[in-house]
Image (tube, rainbow, N blue to C red):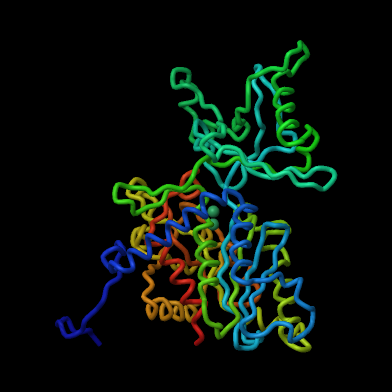
Amino acid sequence: MAASTKKDIQVQEWKRESGWPRVKAAEKRKIESYCRAYMRFLSQGKTERQAFKLVLNEAEKQGYQDIESVPDQGGALSAGSQVYRQWCGKSLMLIKVGKRPLSEGMRIVGGHIDAPRLDAKPNPLYEDGELALLDTHYYGGIKKYHWVAMPLALHGVVVLKSGETVDISIGEKPDEPVFCVTDLLPHLSQDQAKKTLAEGVTGENLNVLLGSLPVEDKEPRRVRRYILRLLKEQYGIEDADFASAELEVVPAGPARECGLDRSFMLGYGHDDRISAYAGYRALLDLKQVPEYTCVALLCDKEEIGSVGSTGMESNFFENTIAELVGRCQKGGSEMTLRRCLERSRMISADVHSVHDPNYAEVSSPHNMAQINGGIVLSKYGGARGESHSSDARAEFLAVLRRVFDDAGVLWQTAEIGKVDQGGGGTIAMFLARYGMDVVDCGPGLLSMHAPWEVAGKLDAYMAWKGYRAFLSDGR
Ligand code: MN
Ligand code: MN
């Protein structure tokens, strides 16, 4: 049967467009205040450990208590209880117990708080050409040429043999020095200029400039030894202590408003602290006892494949839910745990690509997201035929459409880019293995994985609004 070509059937077409015309003045003010607070968080949380501490402090202020301090018996936790569980000071789960039994599942928003960076190598400190340098190994998917000739800061911990932890943070305050990786002057770059972008600056080129002052003797490595003297005086650190350290080199300085109209935010580590922040804030902002138990999950190691004891491949998530089940239900059992995991719904809160007119050739022709067009719902990711992704089922996507539309959340749906141009993964697949419904949903970024990434203010706020609507949806 042919459809009528007359005007009696109204159709609505989806198109990629800015969300700003759909935001009223009162909400614009909320967007501004949300983004001010987020930029403070981003500027203070330059590493996974720092972001972790900021979130934990805030949660404790709002009455969340360590689940390990709650008696390990059924009935110890009930509707309205607020607890957290952490792992290694890097991964964190905030939990607000809902009215329904855990066997009916939870509502989870999970993002990661690690970001691409340069890690100091285990023997990082060396001298070459009478300059002291820090040898690094990059973490996550970076474009190496981004990291030269820009101000860098050094953050991290050195754990002494005694077990004492020395915190290091240099390069953020105006009176502190910064660091840099030098680049070749254009005048001598004839050979470098012929190399590909991937080869022009290599991983082994990423050595951070530390100093040039020598100690006053004629022995070798005078400059290196001067740096060691400074470290000993100011931090009590010896050369051998680098063997038990985690030192991260990141872009120096705070997040800033971006654009003449200030509609963007330029910052280091939007991926994925923008979603992690939105997720934990959304949970803390739930003032009522939710129908379903709600979880904000902040994890580590996403950028290197979610490996390790603090990544989502570990049992931290599952173990935490087992601890929760044991304290909520009398006789909490393995069966309750399995049902809880299987019947849960999750938003894998992670950033997405957006259309960049500078690189329009890699945009998926009719399926690209728009910055400041609302959060991006992404059915699947992966690469080469959707491989290595988690594919959200249509039924779950319909649930989210309803939740978002009912709450006035601006959202869009898109693919990462043109087919067979590349791809990427998130933590979604590590939760999908339990059988729960999981979908990737978060703000879009320009210059993703660059030292300074661009986020849209509208999108940052809509992530919080969308996650809150999802957590509080009791249907
Ligand atoms: Mn991410
Ligand atoms: Mn990433």
- Tell me the quarter of the picture where residue 323 sits: bottom right
Q: As drawn, is 242 to the left or to the right of 183?
A: right
Query: Residue 415 placed where, x, y %?
Result: 43, 62
Query: Residue 461 placed where, x, y %?
Result: 42, 64
- Tell me the quarter of the picture where residue 301 sits: bottom right
Q: As drawn, is 72 to the left or to the right of 279?
A: right
- Residue with the most extreme left position: 6
- Residue with the most extreme top position: 218
Q: As drawn, is 389 to the left or to the right of 447?
A: right
The quadrant the N terminus occupies is: bottom left
Position of 429 relative to 3 (above/below): above
Which residue occupies 53% across, 36% down? 147
- Tell me the quarter of the picture where residue 90 sits: bottom right
Q: Looking at the image, can residue 126 be seen?
A: yes
Q: Nearer the viewer, residue 309 or 171?
A: 171
Query: Residue 282 placed where, x, y %?
Result: 51, 70
Q: Nearer the viewer, residue 185 or 197?
A: 185
Which residue occupies 46% across, 52% down? 421
Please count the marks in the image: 0
Which residue occupies 65% across, 39% down? 137
Position of 147 relative to 103 (above/below): above
Query: Residue 324 placed where, x, y %?
Result: 71, 78
Q: Looking at the image, can residue 198 be seen?
A: no
